[in-house]
Amino acid sequence: MIKLSKMLRLDDLKSTQPEYLESIFSIANGHLGIRASDPISPSDNAGTIVNGFYEESNIIYGEKAYGYAEKNQTIVKLPDLRQIEIYDENDDKFIHTQLQDMKLDMAQGILHSTYKISNAKNEFINLELTGVVNQEKSQFIGLRYKISSDDYKGKIRLVQDMKFGETAQDSDDPRKSREITTLQYDNVLTSQNQNVLRITTENSQLFIEMGLTTDKNLKQTFSLANTPITFDVIAAVGNINQEISLDNVPTFEEIELESKHFWKNFWNQSEVKIDGDDQLDQAIHFNLYQLESSAGRDGKTNISAKGLSGVGYEGHYFWDTEMYMSPFFAYTNPKIAADLIAYRYNILPEAKKRARTLGVKDGALFTWRTINGKEASAYYPASTAQYHIDADIAYSIYRYYNVTNDDQLIKKYGLEIVLETARFWTNFGSFTKIDGQQKFCFFDVTGPDEYSAIVNNNYYTNRMAKFNLTFAIELIEKFPEKAQQLGVSEDEIKEFTTIRDAILLPFDKEKGINEQDDSYFKKPIWPFEQTPKESYPLLLHYHPLTIYRYQVDKQADTLFADFLFDDISKDQLVKEFDYYENITTHDSSLSRSIFSALAARLGLKDKAYSYFIATAKTDLIDLQGNTNDGLHIANLGGSWVAIVSGFGGIQIKDGLLYIQNNLPKLWNKLTIRIQYQGRLLNIEYTQNNTKVTIISGDPINIVVNGVKSTVEK
Ligand code: BGC
């Protein structure tokens, strides 16, 4: 029996926008995603997305300067594979659809939808469509159509082919995608029950092949008089620049079986159960299901801001991966976390070039928005200037290494990335005398909060750079041979150490808290009281320079550093939380999860809980108002961070696993599964108890609620 927690069904389908449903019920496997479109009259957003399949176009600037990003990279919306045409005996199309039901079975990875469809004479038939994607052989999608008569009893004729999709329209909203006019479509195979379409991008010079195999000859006519007709369509979507073969296409049943195994195994490794609130329990399952579905698993692709659920943010990869999504993978499926690191390693040569373009003579600077490694953002104040992405990537390696102890990855990719990013910081920053002391500063940077830009000494950036250097030194000492191969000298280690110790961390003595950047507290506070509700998110209603003049945060910034490093006193943290909370709009979906996790750590249970509710349900209640364009994948990962690090108090400090029971008052029990250094752990929190069980692996020393103990199997 399928538990309700792993079944998503929405109550009010009729008044829900189709584009929203397409995102919520999209199914994917890291390589491809299909939106849950209406098969008869799909919306303009319907279609298939292949991770990393993009077209380029020139960025047109009114005024251009040296080193600006040159080209847009835009994820291609490929033909919608669910579409079908149904004709009646008079060759009139069944054209009106009413969605009856849609349910996503997250225990097995199967999407069921049912529709009532009518022709011009108002005669009805029923269509049931079941969709499932292969998770391991990631090219295949199984679609099963069942058509039955309602009051129409005549014959029908079917057409199932791939319609060339509409691409997105250009928009003023920077979070949307853009139009592509340079795709070429070629039919490379058309036979009785198979056809293959090749889509080529003119500028990025990539192609993808999509094929359909049907188990019935759809060209005949079918009678609906007595029995329903059922037929399967197996779609294949190849890898980029590879031809597909339709010789050994799996059956629908094979795809279904594989999917069931995959998700069973997934939940076994990654389960998070909330006992005490069924809606939140369902929401967290939905979030983890969609997060897993969006992750590239081949080392060549990554996780875009919208995953494979929509084309918002043009399919770009951001720091979202390292700071919000990869924690979940490191702790539940380290192979994927490693693949995400491998992707960064693959674009390291581009990152080195980018550092040179920025006038930094050594090291690497990863780009802010990208698919192919080159910068794709035309607005440098909120992109290239977010240098912190370098340290974020180093941090994801640190986290992965702490959780897995995987020396191999460090030797293969990790050390080199950490070293090149550390080198960037030392060559990018400079010494300045402040209060009689030489301080190492980073000028003209943008922190995570995109409502301030091009500031000096952003606290988060500086703290992360300090971490990046610390970690580089640690790895160099641990892997001296590899470090030598990478050209590390004694002098360089000394330089890293001196700079690390001298990095300025802005602190306001009067307020007794860390200051977001050198000038932050000198600015006036945003006039919140005079700002009507409709003017949020501010980014859509005010010129960036208006926003930059004020103390107002789009998302967690200094508090994010506090959360990661846990290195300030509780008193200071309480003050800091309070201060920044009052000026944060949460206009970015990346914000609330961090507030929730920190509040839980501070014992602010009610606050932690209300931030968590908003985080967990962001897409299910369309909190940001733009789930139409795709899910907020960083936030999905953030909801896991909020539960696991916040309520579950899980942290690794000095090589030890800490667990702290911060269970919300309203919950009876929380169960979390994580992997830790080769073990699978099950952790159960109740109001009075915390129970850690080793499901597989060796005994372990951990600190539970402040007490050090050994857990045997
Ligand atoms: C946030 C960024 C984030 C991007 C993509 C923006 O709104 O401010 O931090 O990387 O969205 O999710």
Image (spheres, rainbow, N blue to C red):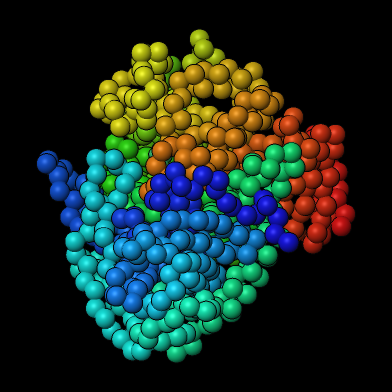
Locate residue 386: give its quadrant: top left
Provide residue 206's location: percent of width, then percent of height.
Answer: 28, 71
608 and 402: which one is in front?
608
Quadrant where the C terminus sits is bottom right
Is residue 298 visible to us here? no
Residue located at (49% from left, 34% from top): 591
**Left or right of 286: which side holds 463?**
left
54 and 398: which one is in front?
54
Q: Residue furthest top?
A: 510
323 and 17: which one is in front?
17
The quarter of the image that holds ligand 1 is top left
Is residue 434 visible to us here? yes
Quadrant where the N terminus sits is bottom right
As drawn, 266 above or below 624:
below
Provide residue 519's location: percent of width, then percent of height.
Answer: 37, 19
**Left or right of 3: which side holds 634?**
left
**Left or right of 302: which side holds 410?**
right
Provide residue 410's location: percent of width, then percent of height.
Answer: 56, 60
Locate residue 238: give its quadrant: bottom left
Residue located at (31% from left, 86% from top): 190
